[in-house]
Structure formats: structure tokens, C-alpha cells
């Protein structure tokens, strides 16, 4: 299993859509804009994009536009010539030059100053940079990926973000849903992180009692996956038994959710864990189920058909689209199984 830092866990359909786009866009040089609330996994996704691209052996250079004082950001991005300003005692290349051949990740781009936005626009249009105090432009070969937890359309409307830059960045938009919108992923992720931290701490994987599961599903997770990951780590240190009980949860979560008795009962779903580090079936899977190859594949296909139908509330056009097949092919498959 991968480390907690670079495995993207999720089974939710809007996330599956994001993964599909990532698969298509990663090998290209298109500019990508990743949006989503804080802690939804934007950075994790951007790193995955770089790893899946042809630029993977070249540098990945992140820069947090919100964390660097605005007067330093330009020189940080584009470099400076000796004597360009008081402390410029020697010529220094910027992050764009350091990333040559690779990817520049402009994190928190919504925080960037309007004047600097013009310069980023120029890089996107001309693929050229100019060092602070420099005499001429220099060509750079970099792919730009940007992320923000702000809603850039609102920033544009408020005059804080350039509209032209927004359109240049938004070639391929990827939106990561908030954890509270990801349904069953909450439990999938908490189980994953509990396993991860329990094995780090060399203790048996912590289980969750039914009430705790209901509370975690009902909690709105304002800090998204980061908050959930922190909770799993905290439980793996503080929880004394092998099962997490209500009293082990932080007061903040319990008070936000209110009385457990008033929560709707959980509808257990038989959702298989899906990771990007997805593993293909192996012979042991066939043996375990006493199935031959054909029956195994038929069963797998049937499960996917059923899931697509349930996701699309039985609307065949939509189900076919989810599966990436023609409507007529879907109908054929359903007929063959008497599922029409
Ligand atoms: N789908 C996921 N599967 C596994 N881990 C995840 C997932 N999404 C996020 N994480 C973990 O959650 C934490 C926060 O993710 P990340 O830093 O990528 O979020 P972010 O959207 O960039 O947040 P911010 O806006 O605050 O910078 C990281 O430790 C990351 O590994
Ligand atoms: Mg981030």
C-alpha cells in the first residue's frame, strides 16, 4: 500500500469523474485549475497529475502564492538580476526557470496580487518570463497547474481576479467535492486512515462502533479530508480499546451532530474500496468465489451495470454515459441478462 501522502482514496461518483478527467488530461500539457474547499485533496491531486504526465522525471515546483509576501513573490517566481533591488546581491533564477521541462504548481492562486496576475498571464500566453531587473524575455517550457479554495468567478466579479487570466487558467477545471458531499467516502477514508495510523503505531486496526459511524457520517467536516485524517491519527494514539466508542470522539464533533438517537439510521452499502492504486483481480479472487473467468467477468459487469443504473435512477441514457458505452449497447447487455 502507498503511504498516506500519495494515495487518493474515494469511491464517490463526482470524484470518479475527477479521476477520469485526470487520466485524460495528465499526459497533455494543458493548464489545469483545481478548485475545492480547504483539505479536499487539491495538492494530492496536482502531484498525481504531475506523476502521471510525461514531465514526471522533470521538476515539480510548487509555490504557495498566499504564503510569500507580495513584494517577494515576483522575484521568487521569475528570478532577478544582480542589483535589481537593494538585497539583490547576485543574479538568481526564479521557480519558473527551476521547473524547466516540468510543472509549476501555483497554489492558492486566488491570493495573487493583480499586478502579478498580468505577468502570469504573459507566461501562459507567450511561454516567456522576465527576471526582475532583467533586460529581455526568456523562453520557458513548463506546464502550469493552479489551485485555489476561493470561488474564482466571485473573485472576478469583485474585481480581485483578472477575467482574462481566469479563462486562461480554466482550460481544464477540476473540482474536488467537499467531504460532506461524498457520502460513503467518509467511512471509506476513516477506515483507510485508521488502518494506516494503527499500523504505524503497531497496534491492531481500530474498529468503529455503529453509533460512531453514524456520527461521522452526519458531521459536516468543515476541514474535509485533512480534518478526518487528523482525527484518525488522534484516535490511533488516544483510543485505549480496539473499538472507537462515542466517548472517544472530540466534543466538537459530538456537539455539532447532536443526539445520536435523532440521526437517520445508516443504510449499509456494499461499496468496494476504490483507490487510484487500484489492484486488478487475480486468480485468488476467482478461486475464492469458485468462478471461471467468464462467470467472473460477467458478474463484475453486472455489478457495474446495476450501480450505473442506480446512480442514474434508472435513466438509461445517463447510465450508458456513466459506463462510457452506447445506450444501445447497454440495452443489449441488460436484455441478455433479463434486466430490461
Ligand atoms: N481522497 C483522498 N485520499 C487520501 N488522502 C487524502 C484525500 N484527499 C485529501 N487527502 C489528505 O488530506 C490532506 C489534505 O490534502 P491536501 O493538502 O491535498 O488538501 P488541499 O485541498 O490542498 O488543502 P488546502 O486548500 O488547505 O491547501 C493531505 O494529508 C492528503 O494526503
Ligand atoms: Mg493545498
Image (cartoon, rainbow, N blue to C red):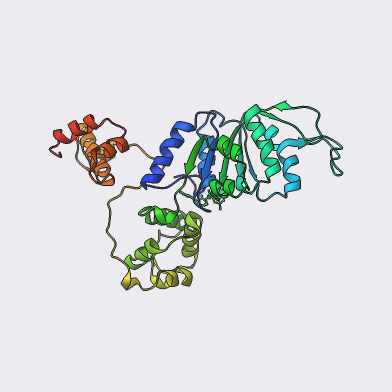
Q: In which quadrant of the rendered image does the C terminus lie?
A: top left
Q: As drawn, is 203 to the left or to the right of 331?
A: right
> Where does residue 38 sit, x and y in percent of width and height?
53, 53
Q: Nearer the viewer, residue 2 or 174?
A: 174
Q: In which quadrant of the rendered image does the N terminus lie?
A: top left
> Where does residue 152 sit, x and y in percent of width and height?
55, 46
Q: As drawn, is 307 to the left or to the right of 194?
A: left
Residue occupying the far left of the picture: 338
Residue 213 vertical position relative to residue 134 in the rendered view, above or below? below
Q: As drawn, is 84 to the left or to the right of 96?
A: right
Q: Residue at x 38, y 63 (%)?
A: 218
Q: Residue at x 39, y 42 (%)?
A: 16
Residue 271 vertical position relative to residue 18 in the rendered view, above or below? below
Q: Nearer the viewer, residue 164 or 141?
A: 164
Residue 18 makes an appearance in the image: yes
Q: Residue at x 57, y 30 (%)?
A: 55
> Where does residue 148 sit, x and y in percent of width and height?
56, 47
Quadrant of res 168 = top right
Residue 17 vertical position relative to residue 180 in the rendered view, above or below? above
Q: Residue at x 14, y 33 (%)?
A: 336
Q: How many marks?
A: 0
> Where does residue 49 sit, x and y in percent of width and height?
51, 37
Residue 281 makes an appearance in the image: no
Amino acid at each position: 500500500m502507498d503511504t498516506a501522502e500519495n494515495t487518493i482514496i474515494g469511491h464517490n461518483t463526482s470524484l470518479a469523474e475527477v479521476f477520469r478527467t485526470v487520466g485524460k488530461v495528465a499526459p497533455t500539457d494543458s493548464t489545469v485549475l483545481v478548485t475545492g474547499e480547504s483539505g479536499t485533496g487539491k495538492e494530492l491531486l496536482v502531484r498525481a497529475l504531475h506523476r502521471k504526465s510525461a514531465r514526471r522525471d522533470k521538476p515539480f515546483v510548487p509555490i504557495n502564492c498566499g504564503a510569500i509576501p507580495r513584494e517577494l513573490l515576483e522575484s521568487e517566481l521569475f528570478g532577478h538580476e544582480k542589483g535589481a533591488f537593494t538585497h539583490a546581491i547576485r543574479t538568481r533564477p526564479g521557480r519558473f526557470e527551476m521547473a524547466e521541462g516540468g510543472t509549476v504548481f501555483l497554489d492558492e492562486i486566488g491570493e495573487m496580487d493583480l499586478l502579478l496576475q498580468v505577468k502570469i498571464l504573459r507566461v501562459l500566453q507567450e511561454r516567456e518570463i522576465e527576471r526582475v531587473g532583467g533586460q529581455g524575455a526568456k523562453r520557458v517550457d513548463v506546464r502550469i497547474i493552479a489551485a485555489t479554495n476561493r470561488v474564482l468567478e466571485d473573485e472576478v466579479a469583485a474585481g480581485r481576479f483578472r477575467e482574462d487570466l481566469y479563462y486562461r487558467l480554466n482550460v481544464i477545471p477540476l473540482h474536488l467535492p467537499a467531504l460532506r458531499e461524498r457520502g460513503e467516502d467518509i467511512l471509506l477514508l476513516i477506515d483507510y486512515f485508521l488502518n494506516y495510523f494503527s499500523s504505524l503505531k503497531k497496534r491492531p486496526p481500530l474498529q468503529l462502533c455503529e453509533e460512531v459511524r453514524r456520527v461521522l457520517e452526519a458531521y459536516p467536516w468543515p476541514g474535509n479530508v485533512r480534518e478526518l485524517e487528523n482525527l484518525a491519527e488522534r484516535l490511533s494514539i488516544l483510543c485505549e480499546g480496539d473499538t472507537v466508542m462515542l466517548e472517544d470522539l472530540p466534543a466538537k464533533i459530538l456537539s455539532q451532530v447532536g443526539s445520536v438517537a435523532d440521526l437517520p439510521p445508516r443504510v449499509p452499502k456494499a461499496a468496494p474500496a476504490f483507490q487510484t492504486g487500484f489492484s486488478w483481480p487475480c486468480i485468488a479472487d476467482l478461486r475464492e468465489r469458485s468462478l471461471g473467468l467468464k462467470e467472473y467477468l460477467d458478474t463484475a459487469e453486472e455489478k457495474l451495470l446495476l450501480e450505473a443504473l442506480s446512480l442514474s435512477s434508472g435513466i438509461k441514457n445517463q447510465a450508458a454515459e456513466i459506463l462510457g458505452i452506447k445506450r444501445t449497447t447497454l440495452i443489449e447487455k441488460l436484455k441478455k441478462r433479463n434486466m430490461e
